[in-house]
């Protein structure tokens, strides 16, 4: 017996069931990670990322900058990630791969932007110049909160959802195709009622017999 003639093992029902179960788990994990990650990014981007003071006259004025003041990239990419997470189920094959890649890149980009924003001081420097009316004014006693790092960590959840979509996306279900066509359920064709057989016409009698009807029935 040659190597080519060796029978290959077929996938059993248990294997197929395990594969389907794995696909459902990866799908649920991707949805959870993507949704939670995007929600936390949007929430954390609205929190205070940096605090400091600026000298005005003989005293100091406290200033703070929210994540949106520092960078708007994480918020924008979180919204893109949410849209991509939904679009994964509306496309197939190559389209699903492209959308999954977009989801992955959205998470990676948001994480990098948030991490870089954790050490940014330009937003507070701009506020200091605006507060004092002096373009050369700089923020003092600068401190950063944990929110930029929380944003970066949440963005990594979006990244993980994208990686799951790239790996297991081809086995995930897609939206039903019957609603993609403009034609809904077609109306049933009206059944044509055969005219009653004329006993004076032999051809009508034969046609009635062919249809399984009784030409002698007075009810037609």
Image (spheres, rainbow, N blue to C red):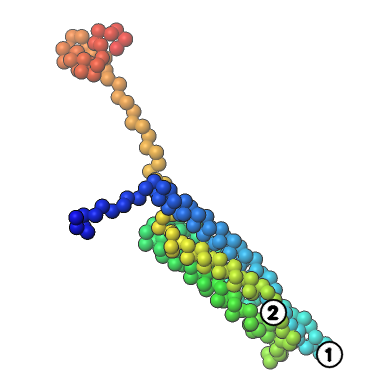
Left or right for 190, reference 30 = left
Residue 19 vertical position relative to residue 100 in the rendered view, above or below = above
Residue 131 image-quadrant placement? bottom right
Task: Decide which of tag 2 and tag 1 comes sooner along the chain.
Answer: 1
Residue 79 vertical position relative to residue 130 in the rendered view, above or below = above
Q: Residues within 10 Å of mark 2 (few under 14, many from 20)?
A: some
Which of the two residues, 21 or 99, is positioned nearer the viewer here? 21
Question: Does dot 1 land on a helix, a strand or a loop?
Answer: loop
Is residue 131 among the parts visible in the rendering?
A: no
Which of the two residues, 157 or 139, is positioned nearer the viewer here? 157
Rendering coords of residue 132 (x, y %)? 74, 87
Residue position marked by numbered label 1 in the rendering: 58
Question: Does dot 2 land on a helix, a strand or a loop?
Answer: strand
Q: CA distance from mark 2 to mark 1?
A: 25 Å
Q: Residue at x 49, y 57 (%)?
A: 26
Q: Residues within 10 Å of mark 1 (few under 14, many from 20)?
A: few
Q: Residue at x 68, y 82 (%)?
A: 124
Q: Which mark is residue 149?
A: none
Rendering coords of residue 33 (x, y %)? 56, 61
Which of the two residues, 220 or 60, is positioned nearer the viewer here? 60
* Quadrant of the rendering where the C terminus is positioned: top left
Residue position marked by numbered label 2 in the rendering: 144
Residue 196 image-quadrant placement? top left
Residue furthest out toward the right: 58
Q: Residue at x 27, y 20 (%)?
A: 194
Callouts 2 and 1 close, C-beta under 8 Å: no
Which of the two residues, 168 or 129, is positioned nearer the viewer here? 168
Which of discs 2 and 1 lies nearer the camera? The answer is 2
Rendering coords of residue 71 (x, y %)? 60, 76
């Amino acid at each position: 017996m040659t190597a080519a003639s060796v029978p290959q093992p077929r996938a059993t029902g248990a294997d197929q069931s395990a594969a389907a179960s794995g696909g459902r788990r990866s799908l649920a994990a991707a949805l959870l990670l993507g949704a939670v990650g995007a929600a936390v990014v949007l929430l954390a981007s609205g929190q205070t990322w940096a605090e400091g003071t600026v000298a005005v006259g003989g005293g100091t004025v406290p200033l703070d900058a929210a994540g949106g003041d520092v960078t708007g990239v994480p918020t924008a990419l979180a919204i893109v990630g949410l849209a991509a997470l939904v679009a994964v189920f509306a496309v197939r094959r190559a389209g699903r791969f492209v959308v999954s890649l977009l989801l992955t890149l959205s998470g990676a980009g948001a994480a990098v932007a948030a991490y870089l924003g954790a050490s940014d001081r330009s937003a507070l420097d701009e506020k200091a110049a605006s507060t004092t009316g002096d373009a050369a004014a700089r923020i003092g006693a600068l401190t950063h909160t944990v929110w930029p790092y929380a944003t970066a960590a949440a963005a990594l959840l979006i990244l993980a959802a994208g990686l799951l979509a790239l790996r297991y996306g081809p086995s995930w279900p897609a939206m039903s195709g019957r609603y993609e066509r403009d034609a809904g359920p077609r109306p049933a064709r009206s059944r044509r009622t055969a005219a009653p057989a004329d006993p004076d016409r032999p051809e009508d009698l034969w046609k009635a017999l062919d249809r399984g009807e009784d030409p002698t029935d007075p009810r037609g």
